[in-house]
Amino acid sequence: MEIIPYEERYRDDLIFLVLLAKDALGRAPRINPDLMKIQEAYLDKGDAFFLAVEDGRVIGCVGYSSVEGTTEAVLHRLYVKPGRKRQGIGSALLAAAEEAMREHGKTLVRVHLGEPREQWFESYAFYPKHGFVEYAPRYMSKTLSIP
């Protein structure tokens, strides 16, 4: 498995991954508009989107967007293929995103978690293990140390 910056050739496989992941969570499988235009929604703005790829297939993803006028960023779309969870893929994606944020001078990262909490139990367990703290219902943040 390798973590790579987003490449357009993986677009359809990324969409398939997200639909699978949402279905496994019991959510209506639909695609958020930003995933249909990653170049415009993330890369053209100087932000980043990463893919976990294995044997030519997307098995995970994550992106972040900067909060204009601040050193903050918001994490988006951290998904891992069902059946591949708890193998370090999400942690590797998060580490790649955090490294990119640090390189771009970000000092704080925020993430919005879904409701009901029971449906998103994996997220509520995952982020605190990586140093995130809840600062409001459904919201967590982490201070990034700049090397």
Image (cartoon, rainbow, N blue to C red):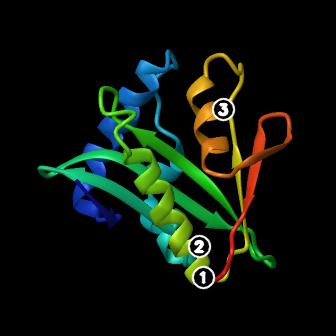
Marks 3 and 2 close (CB-CB < 8 Å):
no
Q: Which mark is residue 72?
A: none
Mark 3 vs 2, N-terminal side: 2
Mark 1 vs 3, N-terminal side: 1
Looking at the image, residue 41 sits to the left or right of residue 58; the answer is right
Rendered residue at 22%/60% (across/down): 9
Marks 2 and 1 close (CB-CB < 8 Å):
yes
Which residue corresponds to mark 2?
101
Q: Nearer the viewer, residue 110 or 23?
A: 110
Is residue 24 shown above or below 6?
Answer: above
Quarter assignment of residue 15: top left
Instruction: Identify the secondary structure beneath mark 1.
Output: loop
**Nearer the viewer's eye, disc 3 or disc 2?**
3
Q: Amino acid at mark 3?
A: Tyr
Instruction: Identify the secondary structure beneath mark 2.
Output: helix
Distance Cα–Cα, label 3 vs label 2: 22 Å
Q: Mark 1: give few (<14), some (14-19) or many (20+) Cα within 10 Å.
A: some
Q: Nearer the viewer, residue 88 or 113?
A: 88
Rendered residue at 56%/66% (across/down): 98
* Residue 105, horizontal then vertical, whole percent: 66, 83
Rendered residue at 81%/79% (across/down): 69
Q: Amino acid at mark 1?
A: His
* Residue 130, horizontal then vertical, whole percent: 60, 50
Distance Cα–Cα, label 2 vs label 1: 5 Å
Rendered residue at 41%/55% (across/down): 92
Q: Amino acid at mark 2?
A: Met
* Residue 73, horizontal then vertical, whole percent: 69, 65
Quarter assignment of residue 127: top right
Which residue corresponds to mark 1?
104
Q: Nearer the viewer, residue 88 or 48?
A: 88
Q: Nearer the viewer, residue 49 or 118?
A: 118
Which residue corresponds to mark 3?
124
